[in-house]
Image: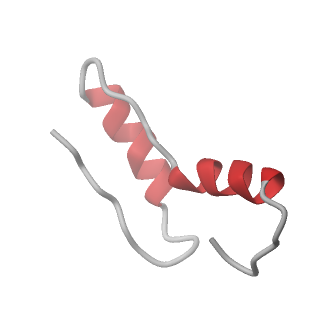
């Protein structure tokens, strides 16, 4: 099962994700922003946004 949380900045998506993780056994949180930050640091050209 994949639960995709989407919404505006600062509305509590991360908070809800961690609360769901507590309730659903063997679940993980995947934050694509972490991958974007990693790529932004290793790629030669810089972008304003992911």
The image shows residue 49 at horizontal and vertical percentages of 68, 77
Q: Quadrant of the N terminus?
A: top left
- Which residue is most to the top? 26
Residue shown at 21% from the left, 44% from the top: 2
Q: Quadrant of the C terminus?
A: bottom right
Determine whether 1 is above or below 5 in the image: above
Residue shown at 63% from the left, 48% from the top: 34
Total labels: the figure holds 0
Is 35 in front, or is 20? 35
The image shows residue 25 at horizontal and vertical percentages of 25, 19
The image shows residue 5 at horizontal and vertical percentages of 34, 60
Is 45 in front, or is 30? 45
Determine whether 47 is above or below 22 in the image: below
Q: Is residue 5 left or right of residue 46?
A: left
Q: Is residue 46 left or right of residue 32?
A: right
Residue shown at 48% from the left, 78% from the top: 8
The image shows residue 44 at horizontal and vertical percentages of 84, 63
């Amino acid at each position: 099962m994949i639960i995709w949380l989407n919404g505006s900045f600062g509305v509590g998506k991360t908070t809800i994700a961690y609360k769901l993780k507590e309730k659903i056994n063997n679940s993980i949180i995947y934050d694509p922003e972490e991958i974007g930050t990693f790529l932004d640091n290793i790629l030669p050209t810089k972008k304003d946004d992911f």
